[in-house]
Amino acid sequence: MMAVWRVSRLTLLTMLLTAGAAPLTGQLPSSAAAAPRALQLQWDSVAPGVWRATVGAPQRVTLLGMAAMPPRFDALRSMPAVRFPVAPEHIRAAEYDGKVSLRLPLEPHEQLYGLGLNFKSVQQRGTVKQLHVDHFGGTDNGRTHAPVPFYVSSAGYGVLVDAARYITVYAGTAVRRDSERPPQVKDRTTDRSWTSQPAADAVEVLVPANGATLYLFGGPTTLAAVKRYNLYSGGGALPPKWGLGFVHRVPTRFTAEQATREVDDFAARRFPLDVLGLEPGWQSASYPGSFAWDTVRFRDPDAFMAQMKRAGVRVNLWMNPYVAPSSPMFAALQPLSGSHMVWNGIVPDFTLAATRAVVLRHFERELLRRGVSGYKLDEVDGYDRWLWPDNATFPSGLSGEEMRQLYGVSIQRATADAFHARDQRTWGLVRASNAGAASLPYVLYNDSYSHPDFITALVSSSFIGVLWTPEVRSSKTAEEWLRRMQSVCFSPMAMLNAWSDGTKPWSFPTVAEPVREVMQLRLRLLPYLYTAFARYHFDGTPPMRAMALVDGFRAELAETPGTLSSTANPYATATQRDVKDQFMVGDALLVAPMFAGDSSRTVLLPTGRWYDFYTGALAGDGQIITVTPGLGRIPLFVRDGATIPLLTGERLHVPAAGERADLELRHYGMAPGTFELYDDDGTTFAYERGELSWTPLVVTRDASGELYGAAPRVASGKPFSYGAMTWKMMTPR
Amino acid sequence: MMAVWRVSRLTLLTMLLTAGAAPLTGQLPSSAAAAPRALQLQWDSVAPGVWRATVGAPQRVTLLGMAAMPPRFDALRSMPAVRFPVAPEHIRAAEYDGKVSLRLPLEPHEQLYGLGLNFKSVQQRGTVKQLHVDHFGGTDNGRTHAPVPFYVSSAGYGVLVDAARYITVYAGTAVRRDSERPPQVKDRTTDRSWTSQPAADAVEVLVPANGATLYLFGGPTTLAAVKRYNLYSGGGALPPKWGLGFVHRVPTRFTAEQATREVDDFAARRFPLDVLGLEPGWQSASYPGSFAWDTVRFRDPDAFMAQMKRAGVRVNLWMNPYVAPSSPMFAALQPLSGSHMVWNGIVPDFTLAATRAVVLRHFERELLRRGVSGYKLDEVDGYDRWLWPDNATFPSGLSGEEMRQLYGVSIQRATADAFHARDQRTWGLVRASNAGAASLPYVLYNDSYSHPDFITALVSSSFIGVLWTPEVRSSKTAEEWLRRMQSVCFSPMAMLNAWSDGTKPWSFPTVAEPVREVMQLRLRLLPYLYTAFARYHFDGTPPMRAMALVDGFRAELAETPGTLSSTANPYATATQRDVKDQFMVGDALLVAPMFAGDSSRTVLLPTGRWYDFYTGALAGDGQIITVTPGLGRIPLFVRDGATIPLLTGERLHVPAAGERADLELRHYGMAPGTFELYDDDGTTFAYERGELSWTPLVVTRDASGELYGAAPRVASGKPFSYGAMTWKMMTPR
């Protein structure tokens, strides 16, 4: 018995080991395995420094097609000439399993930035993301409000993968067997230099569709690549001046009377206010929405709007796009909506002209005709458990996935186009965006509330042509309140969103005065901020930008070796120092926010001398400094030779039409320099027809070598709204 | 000028609102929009109470095809006859955009369980998951070690979507416009009953492929649906008896001498030990692996293995499948591996017979011939930044995505088949699994370390035919150490994994004795545990199971209304009470783990009387009780009328072959009852050929109504290894 058994076991084992054609459970039936099909890439130069290739089958729906305005060719032409920035033979494309796969080369020391609105990290090489519009969920895994499939490299070029799909990007993580430069093989047991992430020599991208469009943007610098991307998208959005004032949103259930009293309160307490935001309660029903004024809370919308106009305050209305049966638009929108509902409201398909016609007609009649200035477009991002599923369908033919990636963009476009048709600039909020959206006059926000995360998002937004506000809502302490207010005043939208908490800027009495001061500073900086946004529009330079986009900034990106811990860090993964808590506003102003609980912080100063904004004193020279600013100040540093123009005196509003506001021109440092001050009428699109001015503010040396500011010469026949301009040399000799 | 301008603006607006065929940026080019194509479902009865339908195109690769053994038809036939459990006309399927979409109906009060190995939640209705093999990342979003696309309903049926793809499941979240029972529309501003998640009447599933296989499993209970699923997968895995002993893994760099001393230490201190685990250091190189014994640390593997055999200890070897150039297998595996590397090692394609041949030949020669008893199959799950990208390709033709979903299963199958061919049972560990894997002798584990999460995972594993161990590694306090050791001793693998920390069970001296006691209890419970696993194999009943699978358990699943907070809960989402911190072992034993810092806890007792395991005292009757067990005890409760058979005396190992270990038969409560005690030879597959016994242990009433235990009658000619059996009536009269 035993002998037979032994033979049987050996026979069984042999059979197992040598089994070929006979299909066993656990093995694939033999059949010819499919192989990937290589795709040829034909590169066309579509603008100076911008190249495009169609990969696989052309797609009906693209991100740029939905979002972008025509490229600003003149501005692109005025940038330095560049060659195709990557070795084209190293860019590969293939199709397999109905999907397109891309591979772009990476040199050993390249750093990558972009790949969506990230909240925890800035440098993205070594990460994997599935880019998917969603409310940020706590991890930079690609699920975010603007999961833009665009990255820039420290080597000075940018890459956009244009597909309205959940694109997966392996940003230098995947190592191919046939890599020309494979990493060194190490033994983890004995080699302390073993790393959990061997360096890969490529970015790999998977697009779950049979085609995509690939764009390359030349540099030569990282900032230049971002500029080309923004210009190719149509240039950045130029806000109306009032959009850069202070924005205050009142609680959901506020009535017209309560809102009016709130506005009066701001004026009485001498706190700046340019925009009042109404939350869902202005509608007769919300979640889903009626888009009709509530007849009790806003009994007389015309009277209310007139009151706001007299107070010099614009009105911004909350909405999400999910339409209630009670809405006047409901019947017309039913055939123009998707298969699924969100919060029991139908989901209009804004990619259809007919949908826009219905909605915009209603908005014109009920809202814009009454003087409403803008919208807060809520909940167009996620979460999955609320929005339509990926298998939803839409009358345009867009799949649930495509619509998810484009919905925020489609509503931004529709509403922005309507304002443009009225020759009226707007400035609003939105919770989802995507590639090509730089020209859309909307600022991203969300429901998260980590102050450090909010600053990281502001930094990361600057790589991908979107804007972000670290809005303030509430705080546990007065210190936290002040620090958050300080930060938000250096962002694209200085906003207190009291939709739920009913806070006011003065809610923490012990810091009410420093809060008022930083709000004042925000208003006074209008000429400088407005110029930064003009640069965004005319030459693609992000108004608030990451340090990685600053010439002369070399971050200490050395790794900190990881400490092995079976519970916290089982692969002893090294951590990389990421510069995510400081940023530039314009070319000259470095902002280093303080977080509650910190009395000091380090600041990384780029190459060259930097001066304290408040005192004009030298702060440092291309070095890391430690500052202890005190509670009342947010650390601000100015580049050597820069001029910051500020409005003078107390400001409760941005300058009104016809008001000639005086300027103080603050020069910093020991170097001469010129600041081109931008101006236009501040509210219409006349600037598109050349109605604008750039006024040089020049500091130069006299015969004795002393610095002095020349009297600015304003071009005649061009709009220039400011009054007297007085130089102030901030740095003592 | 102004008049002209006004007309122009109106004209522009009119153009905008009425634009039809002219393509504007931001709108889709007009074209006929595609629509979803409905798919017919043809249901076949493939086993008693199991129905199958092919949706769309048949797929070459399926989850069950890779994992499952043939169904246990006899056991399925002996289950209650059931009808097709869902209204078939309400099951819909469609194809669109190359993907298959499914819809299954939900009644208003159905609760759902399963959908992968979840760590934070048990009840899954109201969630959205993209089922994707990965190391658990902190959220039950579908990224987990066993993202099994199977769910069971409280209504008593189960659903499996078989596709080796990243399947998205909307478990009652998506509401269709054409729903027959749409939720009530409410105004969030004024209606306190507004909910952020209106009830949907369907589960919707999206499979990113042109086909899938759909299975329905009948009940009539939820547990019965799980049993049918497990039986259809081939029945659960029956471990060798030694697999249910204590498992200790030594630090990575331990040598043979150090490992031997550790084993001796266990014996000297009288701590049980059945399995010694060696970590990466047994190999001459790891990450990537050589799969060859290190010639310094394990200079003489034969001598080491002989030493272990003399000590009565089996050996389990760590490995991950990524093969180093230094491995003897490397050259042969190169053409059998994928396009990408993981930690600089090639990734063998285990779905190919040729790959299995190379690997298993090497394992037989180097490992199994020497007496190695099993493997720990590490890092076959994730994370994305280490494993191959989704666009990787494999020689079998599997895409990176398909391989990700199947890799853990493919290696389990290959290695389990090799042990089976040797007629030698194994018991090991793995970090990834999927549907149909119930018969595979592997227990899941990971790098996380939250004790509550670990218990929730143990609970959730029981719905989906996988096993999980809440392994112990380290602790901050002695209390934590003891509580973790208590928990792991009631799991499928009682293991201390000291790969990094070098801990021993006695590392916390103040609790060394209670630790030893619970390890002893684990060993003494062998007859009871082994019987529970036999039930897993023969009738599909999970050995450790969720309370939701227990008849007479009605969880207080009432919602706690959400408190609105702009920072923490902006949608005032209600939270549902989920029973995730207690579970059953076998039919009779309820385990309620304690977590460090808690001296008391509540326990939900199912309908009927339950008795304290330690004292036999009545604990409660279908109610919620509060217990304060003291540090030395883990709360254990026994069903009225149940018998728990335990080994007697001190146990340092499970009983050896030929050892006749005596039993104490503990009866609890006031009711009669019968426990069918299972036995076989404990190490081979002879049980598959009927070499097994079920011995009834009967407690009945005598003429005076007194309970007494009858002398057990052992069937002759069947394997029965135990010795004297003595009754102990635990509950005083």
Image (spheres, coloured by chain):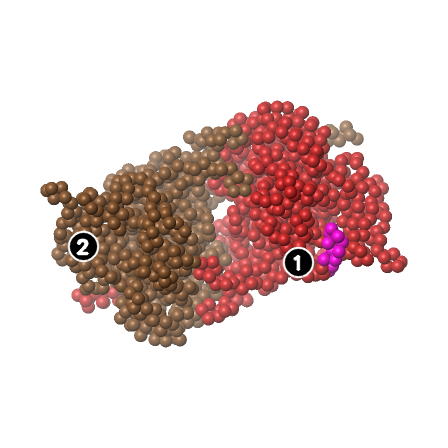
Chain colours: A brown, B red
Query: What residue is shown at x 63% (from left), y 27% (from top)?
Result: B257
Q: Tell me which segment is drawn in magenta.
A: B608-619
Image location of residue A349, percent across then percent down? 41, 60
Task: Report crowding for label 2: few under 14, some 14 to 19, many 20 or more residues within 10 A (C-alpha).
Answer: many
Seen at 26% across and 40% down, the residue is A608
Does residue B661 appear left or right of residue B236 in this picture? Answer: right
Of helix, strand and loop, which one carries label 1? strand
Q: Residue at position x 33%, y 46% from top?
A: A627
Examine the image and state in which quarter residue A549 appears: top left
Let me know if residue B583 appears in the view: no
Work out whether A29 lies above or below B547: above
Foreground label between 1 and 2: 1
Structural crowding at the residue carrying mark 1, measured as other residues with C-alpha within 10 Å and reported as few (<14), some (14–19) or many (≥20): few
- Describe residue A75's horizontal placement relative to residue B544 as left or right: left
Chain under disc 2: A
The answer to whether residue A296 of the structure is visible from this angle is yes
Tag 2 residue: A693
Q: Position of residue B669 (x, y in %)?
A: 78, 56
Residue B244 in which image quadrant: top right
Residue A207: image x %, image y %?
A: 43, 45
The Cα atoms of the two marked residues, 1 and 2, are separated by 77 Å
The question of residue B612 being in magenta is answered with: yes
User: Which sits in the foreground, B432 or A609?
Assistant: A609
Residue drawn 43% across and 58% down?
A476
Q: Amino acid at mark 2?
A: Ser
Instruction: State yes or no: residue A730 in magenta.
Output: no
Q: Which residue is mark 1?
A: B626
Question: Disc 2 on helix, strand or loop?
Answer: strand
